């Protein structure tokens, strides 16, 4: 295991084996545990203004995210915006979706006068 990795039990097995030797019956019980390793996530506390926290809470309800997920989303979009100041929000989202392999269909413009 690498430094900082932790292990949690994934499965526990028990087997009992009985055998006879020279007329004597012996039982042996084997117990084993299979561990899954994982890297421990490091978290920190960030102090933010009460108004910003309120905005996070409200935005998270609208976007169906947790408050932490909404903050992470805003941070990521902010970082991408700083690194790519010539791109619009829509262009950043389009690039991120494409990088993730998501290709939403394009909507066609509809003339409402002819559609009715």
Image: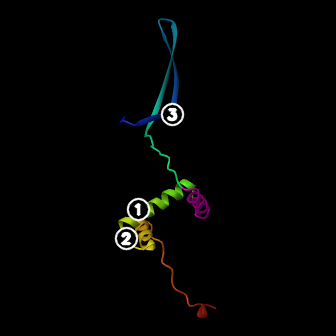
Magenta segment main secondary structure: helix
Taking depth in this image into account, of 12 and 43 the one nearest to the observer is 43
Residue 111, image quadrant: bottom right
Mark 3 Cα-neighbour bin, 10 Å: few <14, some 14–19, many ≥20? few
Residue at the (61%, 64%) spot, across then down: 62
Asked if the stretch drawn in magenta spans residue 51, the answer is yes
Seen from the viewer's position, the closer of residues 38 and 29 is 38
Q: CA distance from mark 3 to mark 2?
A: 50 Å
Please provide percent x and percent y for residue 55: 58, 62
In primary-sequence order, the first of circles 3 and 2 is 3
Q: Measuring from the top left, give residue 63's x and y in whole percent.
A: 58, 63
Residues drawn in magenta? 49-63
Considering the numbered disc 3 on the image, is that residue within a helix, a strand or a loop? strand
Badge 1: residue crowd in 10 Å (few <14, some 14–19, many ≥20)? few
Q: Is residue 67 magenta?
A: no
Q: Position of residue 37 (x, y in %)?
A: 43, 37
Q: Nearer the viewer, mark 1 or mark 3?
A: 1
From the image, tell me which residue sits under label 2.
85
What's the distance in space between the residues labelled 1 and 2, CA to CA?
10 Å
Question: In which quadrant of the rendered image does the C terminus lie?
Answer: bottom right
Which numbered circle lies on residue 11? 3
Q: Earlier in the sequence, mark 1 or mark 3?
A: 3
Name the element at disc 2. Answer: loop
Which mark is first along the chain, 2 or 1? 1
Residue 64 visible at all: no
Residue 53 appears at what percent x and percent y?
57, 57
Which residue: 40% across, 37% down?
A: 5
> Is 3 rendered above or below residue 70?
above
Question: Which quarter shows the N terminus?
Answer: top left
Residue 79, numbered circle: 1
Q: Which mark is residue 55?
A: none
């Amino acid at each position: 295991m690498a430094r900082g990795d932790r292990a949690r039990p994934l499965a526990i097995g028990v087997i009992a084996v009985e055998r006879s030797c020279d007329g004597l019956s012996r039982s042996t019980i084997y117990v084993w545990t299979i561990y899954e390793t994982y890297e421990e996530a490091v978290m920190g506390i960030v102090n933010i203004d009460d108004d910003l926290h309120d905005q996070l809470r409200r935005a998270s309800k609208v976007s169906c995210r947790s408050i932490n997920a909404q903050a992470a989303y805003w941070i990521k979009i902010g970082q991408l915006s700083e690194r790519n100041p010539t791109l619009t929000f829509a262009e950043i989202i389009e690039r991120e979706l494409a990088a993730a392999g998501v290709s939403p269909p394009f909507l066609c413009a509809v003339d409402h006068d002819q559609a009715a």
